[in-house]
Every structure is written in structure tokens, then in C-alpha cells.
């Protein structure tokens, strides 16, 4: 410790805080004095108002040296923190006691460093100096760790940490690890540093289960995937059944049906989807018509564009485009909504109120989608056909009027009914799958993301499978050329 | 009187959402090493004030300085440094639900990209010890933990980078009295060990009385008083009367009377 005449020191500098009791010693020209115990106080400088060291007076206009820490950066002038010396001048009388910071305050916070020193009797000691805290270590951890290790290997040396200006758990841990997590036999510490190493000494390791390779892992994974797919299938069927049972009661009391929810769901999944389905349908119609007419032109079979577009769009493309869009748009929304409701325990709240969530949440969505999907399919197919007709007019010079008069003859009406039927099935499927995955979401963010993804992927897959079933079942209906 | 720069300085702060004014010309400063509690009725803007101090909201007018650096208008690099010097305990813990307890605490340390995995492992274990969590919980996911444990682990995460300043949003809300008392003791012990500056939002009188050096009361869109408990209860204001001198308040104050006596002695 630097001792100069006319300087005041906090005797136990480490760990000093405004609210702590601490001791100040003053070495003035007129002698030496100690003041102590300044107790709880709001302002950090308050203690010094009470400081009247023996033999020195506050109005002596002397310079006090105070142990404290400048902040890590230039932002704060609070001197009374963990252990570093820097000068402060106090001037004035006790009534008007304003600390005065010298303009050129020497920056005495040193970079963390260590060196090996040899005493007169030949004993070696490793001296650590500077600030060993996380912010100082951030940029130097690697090199300091290496140097610590080098010194630790020469284990005969004693360690001296008393010159460390600042220490925190990160710094202490770096040193502790260099010591192979043992206290070296000869160690000098400040009392305040003791705490960090005491904390570390009590700390042990986390036992992690050992990882063993499993040669059957792929087989197990496959089995698990199949079982999980089966489980999902059963759960969806169960959900559907539960919904039917719960809704059976509604058949007797239609007034209790969740009409408002149904109408809201119809608006959200139907009316609000009109724009996107129309845009996509129109473009697909144009592209399909453009590509087909190129081929038909080669054979001079221009007039068959009506058959191709009519059957293709009304029977297949319209329903599929629509189902994919709705699965992505409404399916994901349903999954996310139910998932969040599950996380926030809203589903449990419904259940304890005696309101079956199958009726209040799932039925409206399934009904709404089963209702809006066929309508959306009609809409998409119509817009796609208009797009196709425009393209046919430009490419093949088939007029709009002749296109639409030829359409009823080329496409049997049963195709339209098939499209609508598909819509009902697809809509219900998408809603059920979405609800199923929504109800399985676990209360964490990752599960929400994964659940929504599997919901969309599964419902699109389910729709395509259902479409294949339709194709097989109705393979001789409505496609015979007339 | 002193030129000591406060750790946090809020000056002339206005927070406004459209027509709705949350803070009107609000001033507050927090000195190094002290524990300041923000209290106020529901909707008085306590949490919003804390979010302002964290730079999560932007003021309509006024300034918020932390460590002497304005949170708005400073270069991103400076702000990043500030953010490493504070730790935040959110009300619900805000643990990353996709990461295990271990990874949650290790995340800020790993983000520094300085320390090796062994060091980070030891550091995480140390932090878990500091908040009294057994290590067998380290591999669990946040969803499998009780509310008290989530708070403790969130505190461990907040302390991961050895912050000088810690924000606590309702540290004891949702904990049973026993747990909340032990959590208060934990914060107290950490505050004494690590010399933290603490800013805390709380409704809980016991927490308030046992932890705070100063209490800032938010009402009428500003801080109506900021001082020691003894100073605050002397102010004549309906909120203060109801909050501190209601039945609950009197009970909590009576319990703290012995300690309060000491404080009054020192502050006079």
C-alpha cells in the first residue's frame, strides 16, 4: 500500500461498498488517524463527511488517497468499489465537501498479468497482477490460460494473488483450472478473494451418461417412425370419433352449437382465402393452358384444350391447389392457435368449465373447412379456367365464348361433383390433422415450430393420399371422351 | 453534491403509446451498489420503466443512461458492451425452452466465443451452486421445472457474465412464501457477495422491505418519491397509504421494524 503524507486510505480496501462498515486511516503531516464504521448511507461519499482523522482536519486542504476501483470504463467516477488505488482530492470544509477529480486521473487498472519472481532466499513465487475479471479476460483468456498452465507445472512456486486488483468467478475459475482444481500448497490471498475460491472448491462436475454406439439404431429409428405414424393415425381417428360423439348431443339441441365460432372460422378460412387462391389458380390456369396449347398446336388438335383444361382443372388441379394452399394457410394457423392455447392452459380452462373443446374448438374448424373447401375449389377452378381461356385465346385463337360453350359438352357434370366431394373430404382432413398436431404441442417454442411443420406436411400428404384414393375409386366416372 | 455518476440515470422520460402516456417527465437515478425497488399500482408503468432501462422500449422524449452511456443513439458496439455488464431476471424466467438448463446458462458464456467447453462447464456448475440448484437438474428442460427452480436458474443465467447491474422483474411473484423468502435471502446473499447494483420491480412487501435500500414509487406517470422506506411512508399519497399503511403493509412493516430502526439511525 502506498503511504504518503496527507493521504487517507481505506484500510481494508477489497470489497468496500458505500453501505459497508470500513476503516479509513489517514496519514497526515500532523500524525496518523483512523476513522471507521460509516455504516449504511445512500451516497458513496457520505462517509468522508464523518471522517475526522486524529491530527488532520478536513479543511486542511490535503489530498486524500482513497482505495476504490474506477469503473471498468470511463463511465463512472465512483471510487468506492473493489480494491484499486487512485487519487482523489477533497477540498473545502466539511459543510461544502465536494470531491474533486484531478483532470488527469491516472488509469491504474492494469491488464491481467502474471510473472515469476525469485525472492532473496531463492524461493519462487508466481505473482498475479491487474484485473482478473470476465471483461478483462474476454480478449486474453487463451494466452493467460497457457501462461497459467506453464507456471502451474512448476508446482514448487508459491502463488501470490494479493496484487490482483479485481477478481470475479470467471477469473478465479481460470486460475483454479490451471491449479488442476486444487489449492496450491503455498497461496497468498486477500480475504475478499477467499470467497471465490471457496465457492469453486465446493463445485464439482456434472455426471453425464456415457454415450454408447448402438448398431441397431437405424432399425429402431424406423420402427419408432412407423409406430409413431400409426399412433398419429389412431389419434386422428380417435379425435374424429370424439368430435362426432360430442357433437351428437348438439344434434338434439342445435341452438347450443357453436355457431359464432363456425361463422368466424368460415370467414377466416374461406372469405380471407379468396384472394390468394384466385391469384394462384389464375396463374396455374394460364401456365397449364399455355403449355398444353403448344403441344396441341403440333397435332392440330386445338379444340381439345377445352377438354384438357376442363377435366384437369375441375377434377384434379383445382382441388389440389386449393388443398395445398389451405393446408399451408389455415392448417398452420389452427395448429399454432391450439398449440398456444395448450401452452397457456386455455384448453384445461375449457375442460374444467365443462365445455368440451372438441365441440368448441375442433368441430367449428372441421365444419368450417368442410364447408369452405368445396366453395374455394369452385372458385379456384373457375378462376383457373378463366386464366386458361385467356391463354387459349392468345395462343390458339379460341374465343372466350366458344371456350365456355364447349366446356359443358367436354366435361361431364359429375366431375364438378367429384371436385366438390373432394373439397369436403380434404377440408375435414386438413382441419383434423391440424387440430391433432395442435393438441400435441408441448409447452416449449421448439415443439410449436416442429408441430406446425409436421401439421402442414402431414395434411398435404394426407390430401394427396386421399386424392389417390378418389382417383382409384372413380376411375371410370366422368372421364370418357364424348 | 458529488460528481459520482449514477449507474442508471433516467431523465425527463416520456413513454407514450399513441395517445396513452405511461411516463410523463420521469426522473430516476440508481447509484452503484444499491438496491432500488420500483413499486406502483397495476399499470403504473413499472415494468415499462424497467424495459426502458433495458433499451427494449424507446422513449418518446427524455433520456436513459446506463453506466453513463445513453441507451439511444449510442453505437451498437458500445451498447453490446453495456449488455454484457447487466443481467436480467424476467418475470417468467424467460428460459429458452428449447435448451436444457445447462445450455441456458452456458449460452451467454458460449456467445463470447472465448472460453473452452470445460471452462464453461465448470462455470455453469458454479452458477448452479450459487443459486442452490442440484446438478442433476442441469440436463432437464425448462418445461420440466417448477416455478421456483425456473426463477433460480434464470437468475443463474442472468449472473453468468458476472454482471455489475441486475434487473429483477417480480422476483418472488408466483413463489410460495417459503420459497419466496429463500429467494430473497439468495438475492441478498448474492448482492452482498458480488456487490451488485440491483433494480427490482416488485409487489411483494416482504421482498421490498427486506431487500431495498431505496424505494421508487411510481404514480401519476412519474416517480413521486424515491428514498428509504422511512422516507417513503412519510409521504402523503393515496397509493402510498394503501400500499404501505394498509393492513398488509402494516404487518410487513412491523416485521421489519427492528431493521428499519437501524436504517433510520444511519440515515439521520
Image (tube, coloured by chain):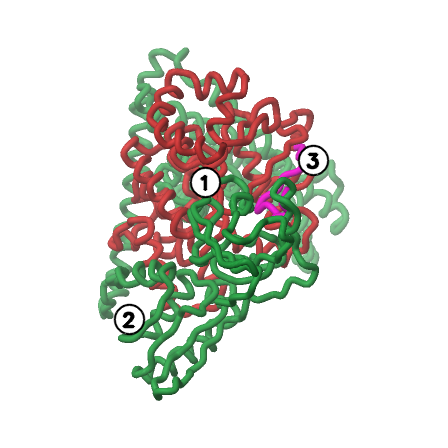
Q: Position of residue B252 (x, y in %)?
A: 36, 24
Q: Nearer the viewer, mark 2 or mark 3?
A: 2
Please report contact status of discs 2 and 3: CB closer than 8 Å, yes or no.
no
Of the numbered discs 2 and 1, the one sitting upstream in the chain is 1
Q: Quadrant of the N terminus of chain B?
A: top right
Residue placed under numbered mark 1 in the picture: A40
Disc 1 sits on a residue from what chain? A
The answer to whether residue A67 shows anywhere in this view is no
Disc 3 sits on a residue from what chain? B
Residue placed under numbered mark 2 in the picture: A183
Q: Name the element at disc 2.
A: loop
Q: Position of residue A334 (x, y in %)?
A: 46, 35
Q: Position of residue B167 (x, y in %)?
A: 48, 43
The magenta stretch is B1-14
Q: Position of residue A181 (x, y in %)?
A: 29, 70
| Circle on res. B60 | 3
Q: Is residue B106 above or below residue A39?
A: below
> Is B26 displayed left or right of A162 in the figure?
right
Q: Colour of chain A?
A: green
Amino acid at each position: 500500500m502506498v503511504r504518503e503524507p496527507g493521504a487517507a486510505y481505506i484500510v481494508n480496501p477489497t470489497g468496500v461498498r458505500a453501505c459497508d462498515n470500513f476503516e479509513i486511516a489517514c496519514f497526515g503531516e500532523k500524525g496518523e488517524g483512523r476513522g471507521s464504521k460509516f455504516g449504511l448511507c445512500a451516497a458513496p461519499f457520505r462517509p468522508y463527511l464523518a471522517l475526522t482523522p486524529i491530527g488532520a482536519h478536513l479543511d486542511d486542504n490535503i489530498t486524500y488517497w482513497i482505495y476504490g476501483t474506477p469503473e471498468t470504463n470511463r463511465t463512472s467516477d465512483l471510487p468506492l468499489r473493489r480494491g484499486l488505488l487512485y487519487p482523489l482530492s477533497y477540498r473545502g470544509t466539511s459543510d461544502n465537501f465536494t470531491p474533486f477529480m484531478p483532470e488527469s486521473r491516472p488509469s491504474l487498472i492494469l491488464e491481467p498479468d502474471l510473472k515469476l519472481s525469485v525472492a532473496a532466499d531463492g524461493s519462487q513465487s508466481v505473482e498475479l497482477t491487474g484485473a482478473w475479471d470476465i471483461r478483462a479476460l474476454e480478449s486474453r483468456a487463451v494466452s493467460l490460460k497457457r501462461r497459467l498452465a506453464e507456471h502451474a507445472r512448476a508446482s514448487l512456486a508459491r502463488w501470490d494473488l494479493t496484487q490482483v486488483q479485481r477478481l470475479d468467478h470467471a477469473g478465479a475459475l481460470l486460475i483454479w483450472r490451471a491449479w488442476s482444481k486444487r489449492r496450491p500448497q503455498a497461496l497468498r490471498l486477500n480475504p475478499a478473494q477467499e470467497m471465490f475460491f471457496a465457492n469453486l472448491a465446493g463445485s464439482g462436475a456434472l455426471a453425464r451418461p456415457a454415450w454408447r454406439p448402438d448398431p441397431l439404431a437405424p432399425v429402431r429409428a424406423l420402427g419408432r417412425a412407423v409406430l409413431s405414424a400409426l399412433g398419429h393415425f389412431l389419434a386422428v381417428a380417435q379425435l374424429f370419433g370424439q368430435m362426432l360423439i360430442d357433437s351428437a348431443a348438439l344434434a338434439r339441441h342445435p341452438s347450443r352449437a357453436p355457431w359464432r365460432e363456425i361463422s368466424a372460422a368460415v370467414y377466416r378460412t374461406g372469405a380471407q382465402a379468396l384472394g390468394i387462391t384466385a391469384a394462384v389458380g389464375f396463374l396455374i390456369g394460364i401456365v397449364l393452358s399455355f403449355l398444353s396449347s403448344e403441344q396441341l398446336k403440333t397435332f392440330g388438335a386445338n379444340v381439345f384444350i377445352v377438354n384438357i383444361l376442363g377435366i384437369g382443372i375441375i377434377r384434379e388441379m383445382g382441388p389440389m391447389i386449393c388443398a395445398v394452399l389451405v393446408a399451408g394457410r389455415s392448417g398452420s394457423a389452427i395448429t399454432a392457435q391450439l398449440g398456444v392455447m395448450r401452452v397457456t392452459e386455455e384448453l384445461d380452462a375449457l375442460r374444467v368449465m365443462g365445455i368440451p373443446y372438441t365441440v368448441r374448438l375442433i368441430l367449428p374448424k372441421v365444419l368450417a373447412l368442410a364447408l369452405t373447401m368445396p366453395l374455394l375449389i369452385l372458385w379456384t377452378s373457375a378462376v383457373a379456367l378463366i386464366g386458361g381461356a385467356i391463354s387459349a385465346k392468345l395462343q390458339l385463337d379460341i374465343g372466350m365464348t366458344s371456350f365456355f360453350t364447349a366446356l359443358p359438352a367436354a366435361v361431364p357434370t359429375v366431375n364438378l361433383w367429384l371436385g366438390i366431394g373432394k373439397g369436403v373430404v380434404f377440408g375435414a382432413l386438413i382441419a383434423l390433422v391440424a387440430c391433432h398436431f395442435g393438441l400435441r404441442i408441448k409447452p416449449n417454442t421448439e415443439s410449436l415450430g416442429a408441430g406446425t411443420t409436421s401439421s402442414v406436411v402431414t395434411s398435404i400428404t394426407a390430401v394427396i393420399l386421399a386424392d389417390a384414393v378418389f382417383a382409384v375409386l372413380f376411375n371410370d366416372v366422368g372421364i370418357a371422351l364424348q | 453534491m458529488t460528481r459520482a455518476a449514477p449507474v442508471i440515470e433516467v431523465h425527463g422520460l416520456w413513454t407514450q403509446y399513441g395517445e396513452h402516456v405511461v411516463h410523463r417527465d420521469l426522473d430516476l437515478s440508481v447509484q452503484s451498489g444499491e438496491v432500488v425497488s420500483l413499486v406502483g399500482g397495476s399499470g403504473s408503468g413499472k415494468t415499462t420503466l424497467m424495459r426502458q432501462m433495458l433499451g427494449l422500449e424507446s422513449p418518446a422524449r427524455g433520456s436513459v443512461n446506463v453506466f453513463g452511456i445513453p441507451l439511444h443513439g449510442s453505437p451498437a458496439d458500445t451498447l453490446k458492451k453495456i449488455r454484457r455488464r447487466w443481467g436480467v431476471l424476467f418475470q417468467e424466467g424467460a428460459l429458452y425452452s428449447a435448451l436444457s438448463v445447462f445450455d441456458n446458462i452456458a449460452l451467454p458464456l458460449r456467445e463470447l466465443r472465448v472460453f473452452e467447453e470445460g471452462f464453461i462447464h465448470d462455470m455453469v456448475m458454479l452458477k448452479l451452486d450459487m443459486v442452490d440448484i442440484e446438478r442433476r437438474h442441469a440436463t432437464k428442460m425448462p418445461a420440466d421445472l417448477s416455478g421456483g427452480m425456473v426463477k433460480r436458474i434464470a437468475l443463474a443465467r442472468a449472473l453468468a457474465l458476472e454482471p455489475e447491474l441486475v434487473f429483477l422483474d417480480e422476483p418472488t411473484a408466483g413463489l410460495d412464501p417459503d420459497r419466496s423468502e429463500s429467494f430473497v435471502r439468495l438475492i441478498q446473499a448474492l448482492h452482498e457477495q458480488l456487490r451488485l447494483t440491483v433494480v427490482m420491480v416488485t409487489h411483494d412487501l416482504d421482498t421490498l422491505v427486506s431487500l431495498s435500500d431505496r424505494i421508487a414509487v411510481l404514480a401519476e406517470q412519474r416517480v413521486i418519491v424515491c428514498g428509504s422506506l422511512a422516507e417513503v411512508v412519510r409521504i402523503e399519497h393515496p397509493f402510498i397509504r394503501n400500499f404501505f399503511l394498509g393492513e398488509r403493509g402494516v404487518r410487513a412493516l412491523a416485521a421489519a421494524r427492528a431493521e428499519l430502526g437501524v436504517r433510520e439511525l444511519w440515515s439521520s
